[in-house]
Image (cartoon, rainbow, N blue to C red):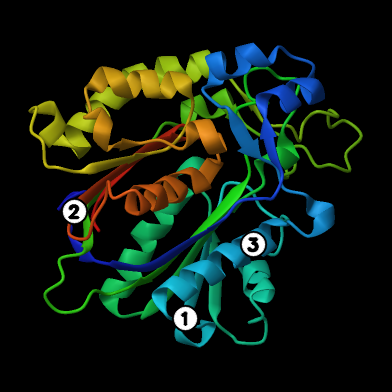
Amino acid sequence: MTQEDCFRPLFIEGMGRYMPARCIDNAALSEMAGMDYHQIERRNGVRTRHFADRAAGETAPEMGARAARAALEQAGCTMADVDLIISASGTSHQFIPDQAVFIQQALGAGRSGISCFSVHTSCLSFLTGLDIAASHLTTGRYRRILLVTSELASAGLNLKDAESGPLFGDGAAAAVLRLPEAGVPSGVVRCRFESYGDDAELTGVPGSGTNLPAHDPATPADASYFRMSGRGLLRRALQHIPPFLAAFYPELARGEDDGAAYILHQASRAGFQLVESIGLPPERVVRTLAEYGNCVGASIPLTLMKAVETGVLRRGQRAAMMGTAAGVTYGGMILVY
């Protein structure tokens, strides 16, 4: 059995989001970064993005906790009903301990003993978390899982970098997960990830880890800034995405329409141009790039929420969630919502 063939029941009981109060439009960003604001949307596809104010308490754990509370409220649950917290984010509050325990603390459950851990596959972290959660629920290891993605991309941005500075935004999203009731067909139909480590240098933050420690005098001052080669990533995507889709989603290759809503990582304007070349039905391709920017791992769950709220995705319908991530990794999941 291949990685994409195993159906696992999973029910999204509730979802929540938190977007920082400070919304930065392109005119404001151009003043901050010293660039032509007319070029920003034309190049990146972003009109506005949210930047967290850490001094005002908008930290990654607090943002994640606010999204989690909204998800718990929608699900009709409390923290007493949760037995696992998964933090699934590309950015992190600090190196050690992992972000999940800080989210637990921010939720007022720091003495609860609820199991916590983090997963990190940058922009695909939420899908990785869903994949792991589905397996844990299927085996009965846990009964209700709180999956939280909270990203402060702005903390690592060089705003004067015209390629990446205007592209990213901050935000958090959360989901409460459990097994579906009898007769409810919700679950993970298939899931596939492919990673190509030889392309790791195309995007990332070289500093902040053991490779370039912050306290080492030899570490460059800009090592903690995010950097990317947009052209290099696009070139690799054109090479790898067609065979990835053929293996993961053969219905597309055959021109079949399974009625899915398309929940894509909001990578960039160029990324959507690639999507358009695939021929997905535009009315079922949900977009949040223009309003939120690229929110790293939070992009997919934020877009999933919009799909539900706008009626593009309904109960019992398939959601085709796909994206790319640093690594370079390509990933996708077909979920019956």
Q: Secondary structure at mark 3?
A: helix
- Choose between 126 and 27: the one closer to the eye: 27
Disc 2 designates what residue? 317
Circle 3: residue type? Gln
Circle 2: residue type? Gln
- Choose between 8 and 74: the one closer to the eye: 74
Which residue corresponds to the image point at 51% horizontal and 46% vertical from the top-left?
A: 297
Which residue corresponds to the image point at 62% horizontal and 18% vertical from the top-left?
A: 163
Which residue corresponds to the image point at 42% horizontal and 31% vertical from the top-left?
A: 196
In the image: residue 92, left or right of residue 316: right
Q: Note whether 61 is above or below 127 in the view shown.
A: below
- Camera sees residue 332: yes
Q: Secondary structure at mark 1?
A: loop
Q: How many marks can you see?
A: 3
Which residue corresponds to the image point at 23% horizontal and 55% vertical from the top-left?
A: 314
Q: Position of residue 79 (x, y in %)?
A: 53, 82
Q: Are marks 3 and 2 in contact (CB under 8 Å)?
A: no
Disc 1 designates what residue? 82
Q: Note whether 97 is above or below 227 in the view shown.
A: below
Disc 3 designates what residue? 99
Circle 1: residue type? Val
Q: Note whether 83 is above or below 216 in the view shown.
A: below
- Crowding at dot 2, Cα within 10 Å, few <14 / some 14-19 / many 20+, comes out as some
Between marks 3 and 1, how big is the CA–CA gap?
A: 17 Å
- Choose between 28 and 121: the one closer to the eye: 28
Which label's residue is closer to the chain start, 1 or 2? 1
Give the quarter of the figure containing the C terminus. bottom left
Between marks 1 and 2, how big is the CA–CA gap?
A: 26 Å
Which label's residue is closer to the chain start, 3 or 2? 3
Q: Position of residue 335 (x, y in %)?
A: 25, 54
